[in-house]
Amino acid sequence: DSGVTQTPKHLITATGQRVTLRCSPRSGDLSVYWYQQSLDQGLQFLIQYYNGEERAKGNILERFSAQQFPDLHSELNLSSLELGDSALYFCASSPRTSGRGAQYFGPGTRLLVL
Amino acid sequence: GNSVTQMEGPVTLSEEAFLTINCTYTATGYPSLFWYVQYPGEGLQLLLKATKADDKGSNKGFEATYRKETTSFHLEKGSVQVSDSAVYFCALSPTGNTPLVFGKGTRLSVIA
C-alpha cells in the first residue's frame, strides 16, 4: 500500500459525458501527478500540481483539467469523453524534499467509455 | 530531451532462471533512475532506485546499477519466481519533484 488513494476504482460512462477522478496523496506529500496508461500509448504524464499550483503540463488534452485543493487532494476532470479516452488513470505523489524524484502511485481508476 | 528505452517483451522464463531487463536512457544532467513493477490489475509499485552514478538499487532480490558511462540501468534477478510475473517499467526523473519519464514496459512471465 503506497498511501495514495484514488476513487473510484472503476468508471463506465458514455461518449460525450464528463467524469471526475479523485486522488489523495500520501500524508505530507505536496506534489501530485496524473498519468494516463493506455495500451497503445503506454504511460503518459498529464499534469503536475505542487501545493495547489500547477507545476508542469504534459500531454493533457484541452478537454481535461485538474486542480489541487487546500487539503492537497486533487481531482482530474475529463469532459466530452471519447472512446479513445478509455484508459487507466494513475495519480502519484512525491515527498516535499529528498526522495530524489521517487513517486508513489495510487491503484488507479479504470475508465471505460462506451 | 529525456527518454528511456527498455527491451521489448514479453519475456518468458522458467522458475529459478536468471533475469535481465535492459534499460538505457537519454538525459541532460544527472537524473535519478527507477524501476517500477505493475502486477496484474494493480498500480505501479516502486521496486528500486538509484540517484547517482555507480549507485546500486536493490529490493526483493532485484538489483540495478546506475552506469553513467553506458547510460544504462539494467534490472537483474538471480532466480525468478512465478510471483515475479508482472510488467516492469524503467523510469527517470531529471530532477526532484518533476514528472517521471517512463519506458514502454517489459512484460515478464515466469512459468513453473
Image (cartoon, coloured by chain):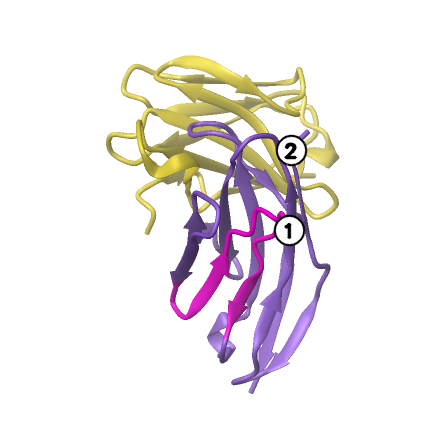
Chain colours: A yellow, B purple
Residue B52: image x %, image y %? 45, 43
- Pick the residue in front: A98 or B99: A98
The residue range painted magenta reads: B59-77
Q: Given the image, on which type of amino acid does mark 1 rest? A: Thr
- Pick the residue in front: A98 or A61: A98
Of callouts 1 and 2, the N-terminal one: 2
Q: Given the image, on which type of amino acid does mark 2 rest? A: Asn
Disc 2 element: loop
Residue sticking out furthest to the front: B69
Residue A17: image x %, image y %? 63, 24
Question: Which residue is at a point 63% across and 54% down the rendered structure image?
Answer: B23
How many numbered marks does the figure carry? 2
Question: Which residue is at a point 44% across and 47% down the rendered structure image?
Answer: A107
Question: Which residue is at a point 44% across and 20% down the rendered structure image?
Answer: A49
- Could you tell whether A111 is left or right of B48 in the image? right
- Could you tell whether B88 is left or right of A21 in the image? right
The correct choice, above or below, for A67 with respect to B2 in the image is above
Disc on res. B70: 1
Look at the image and say whether residue A91 sits in the magenta stretch. no
Mark 1 nearby-residue class (10 Å; few <14, some 14–19, many ≥20) = few
Question: Which residue is at a point 53% across and 19% down the rendered structure image?
Answer: A56
Look at the image and say whether residue B68 sits in the magenta stretch. yes
Residue sticking out furthest to the bottom: B112
* The quadrant where residue A82 appears: top right
Residue under label 2, please give it: B2
Disc on res. A58: none
